[in-house]
Amino acid sequence: MATKLGARRRGLEIACGDCALVEKLRKDGYDIVGVVPVDGGRRSAAEALAAGAAVETSALHRLPFKEKNFDYVIALEVFERVGERARGETVDPVINELTRVTDHGASMFFATRDDAQSRRWWMDTLCAHGWVEDRSMFLKLVEASGAASQKPDPQRWFFLRRARKIKDRGRCSCAVPKGYDSERFCGGSGRPNARDEVRAYWRSLKKSDKTTKHRTLWRKEDVGT
């Protein structure tokens, strides 16, 4: 993953827990910052790294960064760490912010251990926000992890890239690693109305507070119909 992300690109890890990954990557020369959730994060870790401007304490749906500021994002078990059940109303505000602060073509490694939602539900949700699977990198990641672990759980991993436009659902694909059953790996209950629900969320932002208008970067013509 590090090779793909690149040491000279700017990265972000949200809900970074004890911030150990941020600290390690920074020591290795990576330009990366972390965000500790304001509600339930480990503030001591943030304080320990704050001197190097490596960590911010912030609500995840209101990240303190400008638009298109990052080239990659790491999001590991975000909703489990903040004690939120993964559902549209909790997930959409956070994914929307990740879309806002990343540039087109940005990469995201996203992982969850939430068993309440299927891989298909996550694929539908992420795609509605403009993130499509980087099939090549995902399969390479699974292959590499299999060599080092007896029990990898790739069904809960997503390697994504921020697309400029998504005009058809065919781009919301799901790569299946060798040796896994396609229906079991990619099936399950999806989120067929994800795009409409995400657009409704964008409209609610504009209606509730005009100052948040800039936070919605995707328009109907961007994602298609």
Image: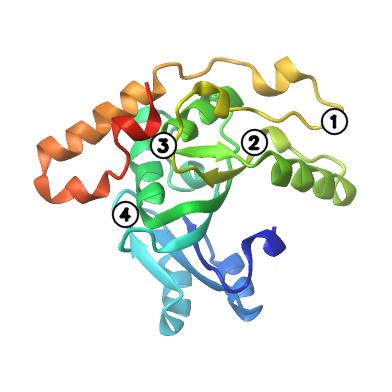
Q: Is residue 42 left or right of residue 152?
A: left
Label 2 – label 1 distance at C-alpha: 16 Å
The residue wearing badge 2 is 156
Callout 4: 10 Å neighbours few (<14), some, many (20+)?
some
**Where is residue 126 shown, x and y percent of the image?**
48, 35
The numbered mark, 4 or 1, whose residue comes first in the sequence reads 4
Residue 59, label in figure: 4
The numbered mark, 2 or 4, whose residue comes first in the sequence reads 4
Q: Is residue 216 left or right of residue 176?
A: left
Label 2 – label 3 distance at C-alpha: 18 Å
- SS of the residue at dot 1? loop
The three-letter amino acid code for the residue at tag 4 is Ala
**Of circles 4 and 1, which is in front?**
1
The three-letter amino acid code for the residue at tag 2 is Arg
Are the residues tagged 2 and 3 within 8 Å (C-beta)? Answer: no
**Of circles 2 and 1, which is in front?**
1
The residue wearing badge 1 is 178
Callout 3: 10 Å neighbours few (<14), some, many (20+)?
many
Q: Image point 58% across, 74% down: which residue?
A: 8
**Count of all numbered marks drawn on residues in the image:** 4
Label 4 – label 3 distance at C-alpha: 19 Å
Callout 2: 10 Å neighbours few (<14), some, many (20+)?
some
**Where is residue 106 shown, x and y percent of the image?**
51, 54
Q: Is residue 132 above or below residue 193?
A: below
Q: Image point 42% across, 31% down: which residue?
A: 128
Residue 129, label in figure: 3
The three-letter amino acid code for the residue at tag 3 is His
Q: Can I make out residue 172 in this image?
A: no
**Of circles 2 and 3, which is in front?**
3
Callout 1: 10 Å neighbours few (<14), some, many (20+)?
few
